[in-house]
Amino acid sequence: MQERIVAMLIRASEKGQHYVSGGDMAKELGISRAAVWKYIESIRKDGGKVQAAPRRGYRLANPGDLLLEGAVQVETATIGRDYVYLSQVDSTNSEARRCIRAGCRDGLVIVGEDQTAGRGRMGRSWYSVPGKNLCFSVVLFPEGLPINQASLLTPLTAMAVYEAIVKVTGLPVELKWPNDLMLGGRKLGGILLEAGGETDRLRYAVIGVGINVNLAEVEIPDILADIATSLYLAGSKLVPRRYLLQEILISLDAYYEKHLTYGPGPMMAEYRRLCSTLGQRIEFLWQGQTMSGLATAIEADGGLVVRTSSNNTLILRSGDVHCL
Ligand code: BTN
């Protein structure tokens, strides 16, 4: 019921109608006005800024930012058909895996406002501030996708997020191999892919995405101060998180459908064009040793080809690289 009320408020704001009367809502939903009021209260608790005016009804003051169920609406083939908003969760990736075990559908999106144990790559934790960022995971059951193509879901997601951010903010996001979204040389977001399957068949993939959207300078902890940024800090404008999330889901769905239909070739060609690591001198860890070289190419499976200072060619499949 709450979801339907949120959807009504969003619809009204999108029509420029602003206020919806409590009586109209009660009639359409077949509940009492007192019940409508109760739901409005719980929407407020979940971050919905619902204003009430006598004789006019209710209106949402933050329609562009609300991530509640009913607010985020996308017409997609797979991604976002099912959508869950959690005001608090340990990690949306962990929750996604629990949902897989419980039998969820392909394309489920889980958004976490407050992640108490957000995870990054390589065992790191992921820092986020409730109400400011986007932290979400997408569950996929990519039937027919060979397991050796699972890692390509990372560049695919990076492309989709890139496209959506450019559309919503116009900011010049950079894609750093293998999973980083950067702005002005600082980290804006990252992707954590967790996949599972049998020897030759990918059974599931969980794509976790974290983006620093409206984080202010004072909200970035000292140890991240020189390496992290947000869309707000880079563009000096608050970014409506709901619009951004919707664009990401639409774009991700389109890339995913194209990937299933035409294979990874076209997406990887685009990724190579946009990946800012290519052509750069980089430093990386190789078998426990720090090495440097020139990033010369990206393989069809996403591996980064590096020509080392001693003229050897290595292919990195994972790990961190630092541009020199
Ligand atoms: C990285 O750059 O190391 C990847 C960061 C991924 C963070 C996101 S936030 C949503 C999802 N849930 C998690 O616990 N992690 C990912």
Image (tube, rainbow, N blue to C red):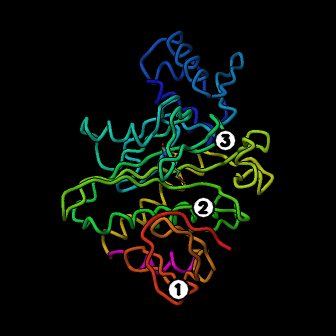
- Side of 91 where 247 appears, left or right: right
Q: Give the quarter of the figure containing the C terminus.
A: bottom right
Q: Which mark is residue 199?
A: none
Marks 1 and 3, the one that precedes in the sequence: 3
Q: Amino acid at mark 2?
A: Leu
Q: Secondary structure at mark 2?
A: strand
- Side of 270 where 175 appears, left or right: right
Q: Are marks 1 and 3 in contact (CB under 8 Å)?
A: no
Mark pair 2, 3: CA separation? 34 Å
Give the image location of residue 316, x and y in percent.
Answer: 45, 73
Q: Are marks 2 and 3 in contact (CB under 8 Å)?
A: no
- Side of 215 where 286 appears, left or right: left
10 Å neighbourhood of mark 3: few (<14), some, or many (≥20)? few
Residue at which label 3 appears = 16
Question: Does the beta carbon of the residue at mark 2 sit less than 8 Å from ligand 1?
Answer: no
10 Å neighbourhood of mark 1: few (<14), some, or many (≥20)? some
Q: Give the quarter of the figure containing the N terminus.
A: top left
Residue at which label 2 appears = 181
Q: Secondary structure at mark 3?
A: loop
Q: Amino acid at mark 3?
A: Gly
- Which residues are the magenta region? 263-274
Give the image location of residue 308, x and y in percent.
Answer: 54, 83
Q: Which mark is residue 307?
A: 1
Q: Amino acid at mark 1?
A: Arg
Q: Is residue 265 magenta?
A: yes
Q: Is residue 122 above or below residue 49?
A: below
Kindly identify the residue that appears in the image at 71 percent across and 19 percent down: 53
